[in-house]
Image (spheres, coloured by chain):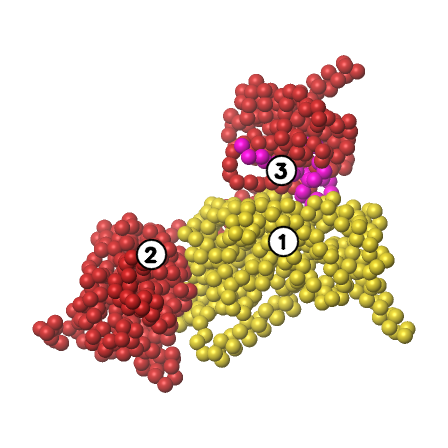
Chain colours: A yellow, B red
C-alpha cells in the first residue's frame, strides 16, 4: 500500500466508500465541510447516493430512511449540527439502526467558534438525545486512524445495529498526514431485517415505538444487554510507555499526539511518565485504567473541554488513584511546554506525597 | 346530497390484500382498526390499500408512518413498514427511496405532523421533486395528543390551546399546504380531496390511486391532502363531523387539483450502473498503481531530518500551499510528514498559518510550537512567531528591512522583499514559492526531484506551474546571493 498526503476529513469519505457505504446525507458546517464535499464528489461515482439536506434534522432522518432500507449510510457535522441530530440519533438507537456520524468538533456552547475543541464529549459519549441509549464512540488521533476507525465504525454499527460516532477535534479533521488505504472495497450487503421494497422484506418493520410498558421495558433491557456486550468486547485504548509509568497522562484526539511528544521529553529528563489514550470513548476503556492504577501514582487528564473526559476517568479509577487535570478551551491547545511544565511540577510534588502503589499497599497489609 | 343513490357507487366489502388478515394492534379486536367511529383514517387506509392492490405493488411498497393517530399503519398494511419521527416522514422517505429507487415509497402524515413540526421536511422533499407519494390527512387539529391547535385549525375553531377559538391576530391563519406546495416547480401532482360525502370519498379514492400510480410510472412527487373528520376531538357525531368537513372545512380549504403535470412529466431515467468493486480504489484516487512510491527514497536517506516549520502570513498569500508543497515533497522523499493549518473562516485578509513537520522518525505531535524555520510572509506574523523560533534556527522574512525590535542574536535571518522579487518574475502571488525556494536552499533536506513531483501533483494549471518553478529557483538563488554578500562583507 502506498501513502498519500490527505486531510483527515477527506480520508473519512474514502474509507467509508471502501467500507461499503453507499449513501451520504449532510449539511455544511466548518470544520467538517470537506467530508460533505468529498462525499458529493465520490459517492455518485461509486454508485451511491449523495444529498445535501435542508438541515441536520433532515439529514439524520434521511440516514434513518437509508439505514431502514439496509444501506450503509453516514453523515458528518460539528457540534451545532450534532445538537440538531440528537432526536434522530435517539430514534435510530431505539429502532436499532446502524449508521456512522462524524463529529468534527468546534468551539461552543452556542455558535461558539470554528476552532478545535473537544467539548462535544458529553453530548456524543453520554447520548445527547432522549431515552435509555448509548452510541459507540471512536476517537481518532491521526489521519490514518480517521481512515481505519471509519472502517471499524461501519463494522461495529452493523454488528451492534447502533449508531457509531467518530469524534474528532477540528485539528484531526483539518490536518494532512500520509495515509494508506486497503486496496479492496467491501461489497455492500443488505441485512435481512431491512425494509427494502422486496417480497422477502415485506412485513419487516422498523420502529422505536413500544406502547406496552412491559414491551418498552423489555426493549430497554435488550438494549442494555447489547451495550454490556459492547463494553466487554469493544473497549480500545493505546498505551504509550504506560506500563509501569508513575504518572499516566490521559487524552484523546490531538491531545493524545501532544501527550506522546511530552512523554518523550519528560522521560528523557528521567520522569517515569506514559500515555493512556482512549480510542473508544464509549465503551470507555476502564480496564486499562484499573490495570495501570496498580503501578501508577497519579493520572493526569488533559483535554480541550471543561472536564468532560475527566468524569469518565474518575469513574474508571473509582478513587483508586488521584486525578490531576489540565485543560484549554475556546480553540486553544494545551501546548507542549505547558503540559511538560505541569508534568515536571507534578513529578516533584508527587515523589513524596502520593501514597505508594496498590501492590506495595497489599504487601504492607500482608505484613501486618 | 339527498339525490345520491347507493347504486351510483361501486361498493366493495372485500378487504384489500394489502391489509393484514388480522390486525394485531389489539388482542380483542383483530378485525377492527383502533380508530374512533367516524374517523377518516380508516377510509383513507382502505383507499390506499386498494390502490396498492390494483397496481400490484404490495411487495415493492414501503410505507413511512407518522406520529399521531395513524402511527400504527404497520398493524394494518402488509407491506414494508418504517415508522418515522414526528414530522420527519418526508426525510425518511427520501432516504429510503434514493437508495431503493425500485420500491414504491408512500409517506402518510397528519396535519400537525406535516404542516407544523415537519413543515421544512415536506417543503424540501416537494421542492426536490422526490419520487415519493405523500398522503396528508388534514383534520384541522392535533387529535392524538388531545385536541390542541394545528397550523390548519380554522379561524374561530376552539381547541385546548385556543380555548377562545383561533384568533388570526395572535395565531395567524390556517396554513394552505396544497396551495403552498403548488407554488414549487418540482411537484407533479397535488390535489385536495375530502371525506365530506360519498361523492367526495369516491374522488378521494381516485386521487390517491393516481398519486401512487404516478410513482409507479416514475413521474415524481405527488401529494394528496385529505380533509378528514375527527368526531371525537370535534365533539360531534360521526355524521355531523362528516358534514362539517363538507360544509365548514371546505370553505377554508377548497377542494381541487392544484398541480397536475402527469401528462408532460418525463419518467425518471434509470440509475447509472454501479461500478465494479475493483474499480472503487481507482475512483477514489487511492489505487496503489496511481500513486508515487516513496519507499525507495526512504531507504536511500542517510542523515537524520527533523524540520519543524511554521508558515504565517495574510490569508490569500498562499501560506497553506507553501506548507503543502513542502509536506508533499517530504512524503515523496520518504520522510514522515504532517501539515496542520490554523484554519479560519473563508475570508481574505485574515491571518493564516500552518505547521509543517518533516522527520525521519514517526511524528508524535503535528503541532509546531518551537519551529526551527519560520517563514513570515508579513510583519504581524514575524512579530507573533519570532520569539518562538528555536535558537540556531532560521527566520525567512518577507520585507526590505527587518524590524529592529525583532532582531535576535541566536537565530539566522534571511530578510528580503520577496513579494517584489515575485512581481519581477511576473506575478506577486508567487511570493510563497520564492520563499519556499529559499527555505529549501537553506535546509537542503529535499532533493529537487521530490519538489518537482510535489509541485506537479499540487499545481494543475501549466501557467502557474511554470511560474512556480521559476519562483522556486529564484528563491534558491536569492539565498545563495545573500550568502555570497555575507562572505564579501566578512
State left or right for residue B13 relative to residue B93. Answer: left
Residues beneath discs 2 and 1 located on the same chain: no
Give the number of callouts.
Answer: 3
**Label 2, residues with CA under 10 Å away: few <14, some 14-19, many ≥20:** many
Is residue B328 among the parts visible in the rendering? Answer: no
Check the image and report above or below for B85 versus B240.
Answer: above
Protein chain holding label 2: B
Q: Secondary structure at mark 1?
A: loop
Alpha-carbon span between mark 2 and mark 3: 46 Å
Residue B22 horizontal/vertical position (percent): 34, 80
Residue B186 horizontal/vertical position (percent): 30, 51
Stretch of the chain drawn in magenta: B349-374
Badge 2 or badge 3: first in the primary sequence: 2
Residue B458 position by quadrant: top right
Residue that mark 1 sits on = A305
Residue that mark 2 sits on = B131
Which dot, 1 or 3, sits closer to the camera?
1
Protein chain holding label 1: A
Q: Quadrant of the C terminus of chain B?
A: top right
Residues beneath discs 1 and 3 located on the same chain: no
Task: Kindly identify which numbered label has been placed on residue B354.
Answer: 3
State left or right for residue B83 relative to residue A216. Answer: left
Check the image and report above or below for B305 versus B54.
Answer: above
Amino acid at each position: 500500500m502506498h501513502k498519500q498526503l490527505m486531510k483527515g476529513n477527506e480520508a473519512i469519505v474514502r474509507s467509508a466508500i471502501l467500507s461499503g457505504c453507499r449513501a451520504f446525507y449532510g449539511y455544511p458546517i466548518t470544520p467538517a465541510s470537506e467530508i460533505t464535499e468529498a462525499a458529493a464528489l465520490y459517492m455518485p461515482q461509486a454508485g451511491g447516493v449523495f444529498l445535501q439536506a435542508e438541515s441536520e434534522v433532515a439529514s439524520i432522518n434521511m440516514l434513518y430512511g437509508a439505514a431502514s432500507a439496509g444501506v450503509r449510510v453516514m453523515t458528518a457535522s460539528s457540534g451545532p449540527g450534532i445538537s440538531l441530530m440528537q432526536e434522530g440519533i435517539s430514534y435510530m438507537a431505539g429502532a436499532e439502526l446502524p449508521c456512522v456520524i462524524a463529529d468534527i468538533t468546534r468551539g461552543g456552547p452556542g455558535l461558539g467558534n470554528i476552532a478545535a475543541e473537544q467539548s462535544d464529549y458529553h453530548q456524543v459519549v453520554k447520548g445527547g438525545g432522549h431515552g435509555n441509549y448509548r452510541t459507540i464512540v471512536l476517537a481518532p488521533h491521526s489521519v490514518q486512524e480517521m481512515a481505519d476507525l471509519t472502517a471499524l465504525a461501519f463494522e461495529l454499527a452493523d454488528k451492534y445495529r447502533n449508531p457509531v460516532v467518530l469524534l474528532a477535534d477540528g485539528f484531526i479533521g483539518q490536518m494532512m498526514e500520509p495515509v494508506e488505504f486497503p486496496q479492496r472495497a467491501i461489497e455492500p450487503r443488505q441485512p435481512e431485517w431491512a425494509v427494502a421494497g422486496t417480497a422477502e422484506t415485506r412485513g419487516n418493520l422498523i420502529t422505536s415505538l413500544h406502547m406496552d410498558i412491559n414491551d418498552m421495558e423489555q426493549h430497554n433491557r435488550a438494549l442494555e444487554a447489547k451495550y454490556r456486550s459492547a463494553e466487554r468486547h469493544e473497549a480500545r485504548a493505546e498505551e504509550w510507555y504506560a506500563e509501569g509509568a508513575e504518572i499516566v497522562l490521559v487524552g484523546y484526539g490531538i491531545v493524545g499526539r501532544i501527550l506522546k511528544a511530552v512523554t518523550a521529553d519528560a522521560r528523557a529528563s528521567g520522569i517515569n511518565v506514559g500515555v493512556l489514550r482512549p480510542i473508544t470513548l464509549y465503551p470507555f476503556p476502564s480496564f486499562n485504567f484499573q490495570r495501570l492504577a496498580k503501578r501508577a501514582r497519579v493520572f493526569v487528564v488533559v483535554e480541550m473541554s471543561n472536564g468532560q473526559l475527566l468524569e469518565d476517568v474518575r469513574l474508571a479509577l473509582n478513587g483508586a488513584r488521584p486525578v490531576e487535570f489540565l485543560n484549554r478551551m475556546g480553540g486553544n491547545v494545551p501546548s507542549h511546554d505547558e503540559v511538560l511544565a505541569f508534568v515536571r511540577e507534578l513529578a516533584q510534588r508527587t515523589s513524596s506525597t502520593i501514597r505508594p502503589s496498590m501492590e506495595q499497599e497489599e504487601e504492607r497489609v500482608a505484613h501486618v | 346530497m339527498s339525490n345520491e343513490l347507493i347504486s351510483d357507487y361501486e361498493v366493495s366489502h372485500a378487504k384489500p390484500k394489502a391489509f393484514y388478515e388480522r390486525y394485531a394492534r389489539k388482542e380483542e379486536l383483530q378485525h377492527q382498526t383502533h380508530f374512533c367511529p367516524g374517523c377518516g383514517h380508516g377510509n383513507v387506509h382502505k383507499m390506499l390499500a386498494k390502490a396498492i392492490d390494483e397496481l400490484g405493488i404490495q411487495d415493492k411498497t414501503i410505507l413511512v408512518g407518522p406520529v399521531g393517530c395513524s402511527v400504527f399503519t404497520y398493524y394494518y398494511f402488509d407491506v414494508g413498514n418504517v415508522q418515522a419521527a414526528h414530522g420527519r416522514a418526508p426525510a425518511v422517505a427520501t432516504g429510503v427511496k434514493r437508495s431503493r429507487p425500485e420500491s414504491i415509497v408512500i409517506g402518510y402524515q397528519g396535519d400537525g405532523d406535516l404542516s407544523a413540526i415537519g413543515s421544512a421536511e415536506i417543503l424540501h422533499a416537494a421542492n426536490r421533486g422526490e419520487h415519493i407519494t405523500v398522503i396528508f390527512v388534514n383534520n384541522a387539529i392535533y387529535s392524538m395528543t388531545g385536541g390542541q391547535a394545528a397550523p390548519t385549525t380554522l379561524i374561530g375553531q376552539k381547541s385546548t390551546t385556543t380555548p377562545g377559538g383561533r384568533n388570526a391576530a395572535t395565531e395567524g391563519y390556517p396554513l394552505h399546504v396544497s396551495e403552498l406546495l403548488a407554488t414549487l416547480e418540482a411537484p407533479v401532482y397535488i390535489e385536495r380531496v375530502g371525506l365530506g360525502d360519498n361523492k367526495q370519498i369516491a374522488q378521494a379514492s381516485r386521487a390517491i390511486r393516481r398519486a401512487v400510480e404516478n410513482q409507479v410510472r416514475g413521474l415524481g412527487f405527488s401529494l394528496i391532502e385529505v380533509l378528514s373528520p375527527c368526531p371525537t376531538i370535534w365533539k360531534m357525531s360521526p355524521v355531523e363531523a362528516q358534514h362539517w368537513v363538507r360544509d365548514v372545512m371546505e370553505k377554508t380549504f377548497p377542494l381541487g387539483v392544484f398541480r397536475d403535470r402527469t401528462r408532460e412529466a418525463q419518467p425518471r431515467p434509470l440509475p447509472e450502473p454501479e461500478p465494479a468493486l475493483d474499480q472503487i480504489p481507482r475512483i477514489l484516487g487511492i489505487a496503489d498503481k496511481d500513486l508515487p512510491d516513496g519507499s525507495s527514497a526512504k531507504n536511500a536517506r542517510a542523515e537524520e531530518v527533523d524540520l519543524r516549520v511554521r508558515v504565517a502570513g495574510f490569508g490569500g498569500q498562499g501560506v497553506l500551499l507553501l506548507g503543502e508543497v513542502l509536506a508533499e515533497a517530504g512524503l515523496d522523499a520518504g520522510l514522515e510528514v504532517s501539515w496542520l493549518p490554523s484554519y479560519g473562516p473563508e475570508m481574505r485578509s485574515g491571518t493564516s498559518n500552518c505547521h509543517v513537520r518533516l522527520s525521519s522518525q514517526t511524528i508524535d505531535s503535528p503541532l509546531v510550537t518551537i519551529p526551527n524555520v519560520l517563514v513570515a510572509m508579513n510583519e504581524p506574523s514575524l512579530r507573533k512567531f519570532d520569539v518562538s523560533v528555536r535558537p540556531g534556527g532560521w527566520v525567512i522574512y518577507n520585507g526590505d528591512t527587518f524590524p529592529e525590535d525583532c532582531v535576535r542574536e541566536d537565530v539566522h535571518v534571511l530578510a528580503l522583499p520577496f513579494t517584489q522579487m515575485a512581481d519581477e518574475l511576473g506575478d506577486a502571488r508567487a511570493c510563497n514559492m520564492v520563499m519556499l525556494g529559499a527555505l529549501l536552499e537553506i535546509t537542503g533536506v529535499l532533493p529537487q526531484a521530490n519538489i518537482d513531483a510535489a509541485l506537479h501533483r499540487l499545481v494543475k494549471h501549466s501557467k502557474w506551474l511554470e511560474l512556480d518553478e521559476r519562483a522556486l529557483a529564484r528563491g534558491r538563488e536569492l539565498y545563495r546571493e545573500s550568502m555570497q554578500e555575507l562572505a564579501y562583507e566578512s
